[in-house]
């Protein structure tokens, strides 16, 4: 019986199939499930309970950072490896804060990815090609927070992701062009509550206005361009 059970969460079927073919050649790795969006991933992770999840960030319905946080909350021993086309230091930090054990560009060599799967299954982390144990990751995170205190500030109730689930929900509506009043109506909350959340979003992302926040979220892959076409009045 193969030791490492892997689930692939990726919305592009061709890339997903390619990952499966590569992994199934390994004697100790078995792909037990695949998912093409956030909802499907939540259903299948509960059924299959993989040891390792290969996670895209730019997903329909629920993005990969939100899923990573949810998975690590529900299944602390499960390891998540983020695979993304948005390869930069900022995104790396967000991924690790969300609970990921490793982060790679989708251009990663198959041998490097397979090695990383085995390392995270052992409980280690892979950051910038370095294999780290948990105390070393804590030291790395503290160094990042010291270097970028304004960009990476966080609240006690949400220590691993830049935005809370409610803030991400509001930001998604903002990228669709909805005003604060329209967002409040959609979420059944007050306009002032939306304003308060927007203030927190701008502070956490270190941007000056809602347009910059929307562009930032799209650029990072948290929100898909095709999911922003709703329309609305951007005035307050």
Image: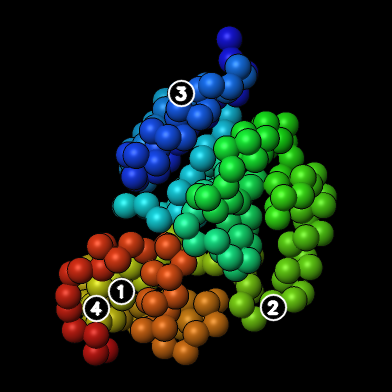
Residues 186 and 65: in front is 65
Q: Quadrant of the N terminus?
A: top right
Reading the image, the residue beneath label 3 is 32
Residues under numbered marks 4 and 1 in contact, where contact means CB atoms less than 8 Å apart: yes
C-alpha separation, residue under disc 3 versus residue under disc 2: 40 Å
The numbered mark, 2 or 4, whose residue comes first in the sequence reads: 2
What's the mark number on residue 175? 1
Query: What residue is shown with label 4?
Result: 177
Q: Position of residue 83 (x, y in %)?
A: 52, 49
Disc nearer the start of the sequence (1/3): 3
Crowding at dot 3, Cα within 10 Å, few <14 / some 14-19 / many 20+, comes out as: some
Q: Is residue 57 above or below residue 156?
A: above
Q: Which residue is depicted at the point 40% across and 56% down?
A: 58
Q: Residue furthest top?
A: 1
Image spot of residue 37 (x, y percent): 34, 44
For mark 1, does the 10 Å Cα neighbourhood hold few (<14), some (14 to 19), or many (20 or more) residues? Answer: many
Q: Which label sits in the foreground, 1 or 3?
A: 3
Q: State the CA–CA distance, disc 2 to disc 4.
A: 30 Å
Q: Which residue is mark 2?
A: 149
Q: Mark 3 and mark 4: span between their CA atoms? A: 39 Å
Query: Which x, y percent locates residue 107?
Result: 52, 50
When the figure is inspected, residue 200 is found, relative to residue 13, above or below; the finding is: below
- Is 209 placed left or right of 205 in the picture? left
């Amino acid at each position: 019986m193969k030791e490492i059970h892997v689930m692939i969460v990726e919305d592009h079927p061709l890339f997903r199939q390619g990952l499966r073919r590569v992994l199934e050649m390994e004697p100790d790795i078995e792909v037990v499930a695949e998912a093409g969006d956030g909802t499907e991933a939540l259903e299948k992770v509960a059924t299959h309970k993989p040891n390792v999840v290969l996670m895209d960030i730019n997903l329909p319905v629920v993005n990969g950072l939100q899923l990573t946080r949810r998975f690590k909350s529900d299944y602390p021993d499960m390891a998540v490896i983020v695979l993304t086309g948005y390869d930069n230091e900022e995104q790396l930090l967000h991924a690790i804060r969300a609970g990921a054990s490793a982060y790679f560009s989708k251009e990663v060599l198959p041998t490097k990815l397979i090695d990383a799967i085995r390392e995270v299954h052992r409980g280690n982390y892979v950051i910038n090609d370095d294999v780290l144990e948990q105390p070393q990751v804590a030291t790395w995170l503290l160094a990042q927070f010291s270097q970028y205190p304004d960009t990476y500030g966080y609240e006690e109730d949400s220590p691993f992701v830049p935005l809370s689930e409610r803030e991400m929900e509001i930001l998604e509506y903002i990228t669709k062009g909805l005003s604060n009043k329209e967002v409040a109506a959609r979420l059944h909350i007050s306009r002032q509550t939306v304003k308060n959340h927007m203030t927190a979003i701008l502070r956490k992302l270190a941007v000056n206005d809602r347009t910059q926040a929307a562009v930032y979220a799209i650029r990072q892959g948290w929100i898909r361009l095709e999911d922003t076409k709703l329309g609305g009045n951007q005035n307050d």
